[in-house]
Amino acid sequence: NAGVTQTPKFRILKIGQSMTLQCAQDMNHNYMYWYRQDPGMGLKLIYYSVGAGITDKGEVPNGYNVSRSTTEDFPLRLELAAPSQTSVYFCASSYREGGYEQFFGPGTRLTVL
Amino acid sequence: DAKTTQPTSMDCAEGRAANLPCNHSTISGNEYVYWYRQIHSQGPQYIIHGLKNNETNEMASLIITEDRKSSTLILPHATLRDTAVYYCIVRVDGGTSYGKLTFGQGTILTVHP
């Protein structure tokens, strides 16, 4: 199993550009999450999904959108990138509701200039 | 969620046991203790969790005091690759929670040769 994979690993965007961060898992997990982590800080939940076709907002959803058309994939879309979105983005998945054994991807380091 | 208190940093010699404490004096009866770690520039990694009994897996052991107000994560034979920030998290497991992880400051464990 590859676990949770994320692409790209690094990206530099100009203000106002858009991009999609890709996340995929091959563990057949229903629950998937997007977090951001600013330097020296903890994780903040952006969006989560409890299964294909179902997504919901976390604590910092503004400026982002997600979709979940399959169990495996959970892309995160940034529209009109802003410097405040400079961060490291982690995707995670888990196999049961409310379970905290989450499996994380390696992260995408995004810089918006 | 119960608040946790961890030392800011700890050192350990390679090959020795690393014992990382966590205080959670306000823990409720249905709250689990989870441990994660984050190696520099990588995604968080689940280590272990428990409710009241001691737990052991291939990575570590978790010792929870009888009153459940504190716990200790034990890495039996620390290696240089165990150098990371270790997070103790206390949360209700299962139910309607969507599994959002909230990390505190954690303990920076440095393993020396």
Image (spheres, coloured by chain):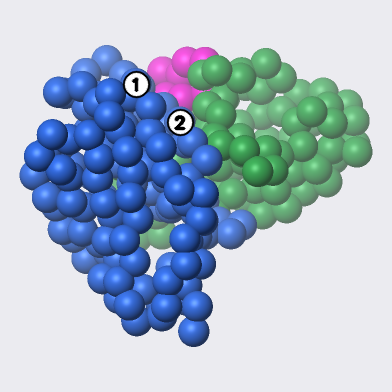
Q: Is residue B113 above or below residue A24?
A: below
Q: Is residue A101 above or below residue B9?
A: above
Instruction: Decide if residue B32 is in sight here.
Output: yes
Magenta stretch bounds: A47-57
Which chain is represented by blue in the image?
Answer: B
Residue at position x 52%, y 40% from top? B105
Report x, y in % for residue A17.
85, 31
What shade does chain A have? green
Residue at position x 38%, y 27% from top? B3
Q: Is residue A24 above or below residue A83?
A: below
Q: Quadrant of the N terminus of chain B?
A: top left
- How many neighbours does mark 1 have within 10 angstroms: few (below 14), some (14-19), or many (20 or more)? few
Report x, y in % for residue A53.
42, 20
Report x, y in % for residue A107.
59, 49
Residue at position x 47%, y 36% from top? B103
Disc 2 and disc 1 in contact, CB within 8 angstroms? yes
Q: Is residue A1 left or right of residue B56?
A: right
Q: Which mark is residue B1?
A: 1
Badge 2: chain ID: B
Residue B34 covered by magenta stretch:
no
Per the picture, the main secondary structure of the magenta-coloured stretch is: strand
Q: Which residue is mark 2?
A: B102
Of callouts 2 and 1, the N-terminal one? 1
- How many neighbours does mark 2 have within 10 angstroms: few (below 14), some (14-19), or many (20 or more)? some
Q: Is residue A46 left or right of residue B3?
A: right
